[in-house]
Image (spheres, rainbow, N blue to C red):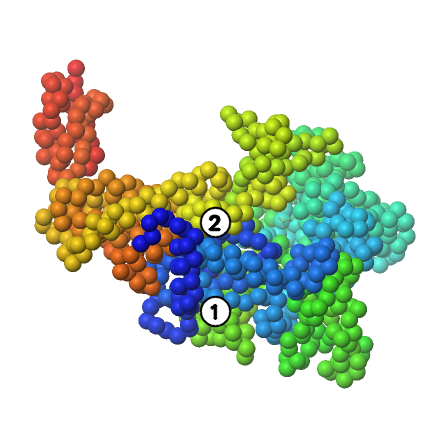
Amino acid sequence: MLQDYDFSAIEQSQQDKWQADNRYQTNNLDNGKPARYMLSMFPYPSGKLHMGHVRNYAITDVLSRYYRQKGHDVMQPMGWDAFGLPAENAAIAHGVAPAKWTFANIDNMREQLKSLGLSIDWSREFATCTPDYYKWEQWLFLQLYKKGLVYKKLATVNWDPVDNTVLANEQVVDGRGWRSGAIVEKRDIPMYYYKITEYADELLADLKTLEGKWPKQVLSMQQNWIGKSHGMELSFKYEIDGQADELTVFTTRPDTVMGVTYLAVAAEHPLAQHAARTNEAIAEFCAQCKQGSVAEADLAKAEKVGMDTGLVAVHPITGQSVPVWVANYVLMSYGSGAVMAVPAHDERDFEFANKYGLPIRQVIDIKGQSYDKNAWQEWYADKENGVCINSGELDGLNKDDAIAKIATLLGDKGKITTQYRLRDWGVSRQRYWGCPIPMINCTYCGTVPVDEADLPVILPTDVVPDGRGNPLKNMPEFLECTCPKCGQPAERETDTFDTFMESSWYAQRFTTPNDDTQMVGRVGADKWLSVDQYVGGVEHAVLHLLYARFFHKVMRDEGLVGGDEPFANLLAQGMVLAGTYYRENTDGSKTYYFPHEVAIDNGKATLIADGKPVVVGKIEKMSKSKNNGVDPQTIINEYGADTVRLYTLFTAPADQTLEWSDSALKGPHNFVKKVWRIVGEHLTAINNHTADLIIDKTALSKSAKELRHKTHKTIAKIDISLGEHLALNTPVSALMELTNELSAFEIKDINDLAVKHETVIALLSMLALYAPHVGEYLLEQFGFDSRNITFPIVDEDALVNDSVKMVVQVNGKVRGQMEVGPDLDNDTLINLAKEVEGVSKFLTGEIKKAIVVPNKLVSFVVAG
Ligand code: ANZ
Ligand code: ZN
């Protein structure tokens, strides 16, 4: 054994061993062990690992090692979510091709991952930007196209008129293009859509099967995103130039129909377009609505504005005329793109009506509340408690009764319907660095799918985009092709897939990553799926998980995989936070400093460089812009991967935020050193005794019994923490406690030595989950083969307490202690307690009550 704890030497030598014997490689054949698939959300190859990655992969790795020790056949794969915008931005900034940049980053990050000591099956690695992978994405698209689950329609995008390019929502900053600064326009262009709405009901219903296995919060975010609303479609009649027609609105509150004071349509609605043809001001307003972001969140925040179209429609119950407005808060893509506005009970309508002086008519009353037209109150929108007022025949009815009544009054002018908030998934992106959409545009035949035999459509990789449109459009070698239908010259689609596509099926592909005959092979898929434990950031709670669930169901319906859900259990890990330090500049901007540039003394922070004060800012998510990120590599170099792993797992429960502190790394580091020292001493001590280290349970000293008790309680506790509660932090403190007991344990005879040995081995086996390098290395010093480490087995005998310490109280005050045998009945305990030294003198009065808390306390209540 090495003299000192030289972590870099140990970590290197263990990693070399794993690499040399392909330690964590798995195969798809049944080997009699239960298969367990452990998956971390795979990284985007940005170039460097950050602490969020480290935390994510450390969690999955500890759980993987745990199940391996428990005898499972554990598969923990890793790959690269390699398409995406940052590569194009890097190309623009540094003139390097996205492919080259991406693969160089992958090489860097793979080394970083290896230095963390993760038990990954590298034989399954892939990058999603390679044709071997994306070929199958194109193939699936064609299958769905055939089935009618893919369609093409116009969609509105952010258009930068200077760079002549489509912008992603995050590239629109305050309504302008991030690069050009030009005011962003909206444009309608044809895009492909996946009919995810066809699966809306199933996606919603199956959330039930994940209860207790996925975080509650994620389940409810999924539910809200799918957003099933029950409501009614109502028709309002109108006439244009003597032509009668109907305007349909979707409402979830038909009970408020008597409070309708205007109708509002989206700028893209045919009625708005009709008005725009004869009214220039309306035309201009509609054009303005087309500017700015298309992100729904931005629309919700935007000020509500609109114009009267001059048209009127007929209220289906009262027969009164209702004006039709065009308003920016009505979305063309939801319901029918038109709303019946009830300003008294809908907050958006309230704001709008107040702004334009439209009438507000209260039609819902809640006992004891008084309505004020000038200020919105939450109860105006209460869906549960009100009754109708000012509503003629409906007066006095509650919501459900009112809706039933309206349905009969309206007859075929009202139809009960269900609406989903969920939209079909637009998968076209007008970007270069993505998977080509396998379609061909022919002058004669329109859009024609690429022949399956011609897959993959390969993305050219020797391209450096400059931010002005999609470079594929200027590459005849990509663009030009022959129409598979008519044989005439045609053009390839230059749009590529949304990068959420690649991450929607990578989990399935990992089961048969090298199969070049099919997307997923059934043998591998059936062995491993569904993923037993998925671990990743909560920021992916909605879209990624929803798309991946959708893909799994689609792949199931193609016969590629079994089961209805891809991820059986989900752990959403918390963010890694760190303190920030800054100075405010004269223009109000802030300059942030790295923690190592700052000295802190008595809570006062100064910049080391000039000794002048800096402001101690908030504790925030680690990020480049705040200079508060900690580079994992630096910390690994300083303390070793084992310490970093212990630290990130020990400091906070996995699903909560972790506040980083460099100085706190010393705790786990010293813990490892302490284990090192104890084990070193123990090795020396057993040198001559290795053969006779067998515990004689009949001859245990008191302290040996106690140590065994502690050891086996710790094993049982850690087993439950990891196996049942996904609690990764408490086992570390349990191991620290056990180490303290171990170091206090004194050896008096050979039996003590055997007991100590048992604890040392158990400690190291469990430590090897968190700190695999040092754990395995130390076990090897005792002759263990690190390939066969097993989780220690609890000895039930050792769990039985020989004696328990109990406190004795009189009238709420502690008066003594006693050590008694286990499982004594209450009467015996009470009698023993009465005899305890120092207690009897307080028991002179009448004993009114004696309470026993098993294994803890006997409490007397005495009169007087
Ligand atoms: C009248 C009403 C009265 C409404 C009231 C609400 C409260 P959820 O629950 O999200 O499904 N709406 C319908 N189509 C719309 C569109 N294209 N753009 C913007 N808003 C639209 O929302 C349904 C409600 O959103 C509908 O019910 C409608 O306003 C509005 F006291 O109708 B309601
Ligand atoms: Zn053709």
Give the class, few, some or many, for how many residues have Cα within 10 Å of label 2's Cα (few <14, many ≥20). Answer: some
Q: Does dot 1 land on a helix, a strand or a loop?
A: helix
Q: What residue type is labelled 2?
A: Ile
Q: Is residue 654 visible?
A: no
Q: Which of 723 and 187 is in front in this view?
A: 723
Q: What residue type is labelled 1?
A: Ser
Quadrant of the drawing holding the N terminus: bottom left
Q: Is 715 positioned to the left or the right of 642 in the image? A: left
Residue assigned mark 1: 123
Quadrant of the drawing holding the C terminus: top left
Q: Can residue 439 be seen in this view?
A: yes
Give the class, few, some or many, for how many residues have Cα within 10 Å of label 1's Cα (few <14, many ≥20). Answer: some
* Location of residue 122 in the rendering, given as x and y in whole percent from the top left corner: 48, 66
Q: Residue, x 16% and y 58% (percent of image)?
A: 691
* Location of residue 642 in the rendering, given as x and y in whole percent from the top left corner: 41, 50
Q: Which marked residue is nearer to the observer: mark 2 or mark 1?
A: 2
Residue lying furthest top: 864
Q: Distance between the residues labelled 2 and 1?
A: 25 Å
Residue lying furthest front: 3
Residue assigned mark 2: 636
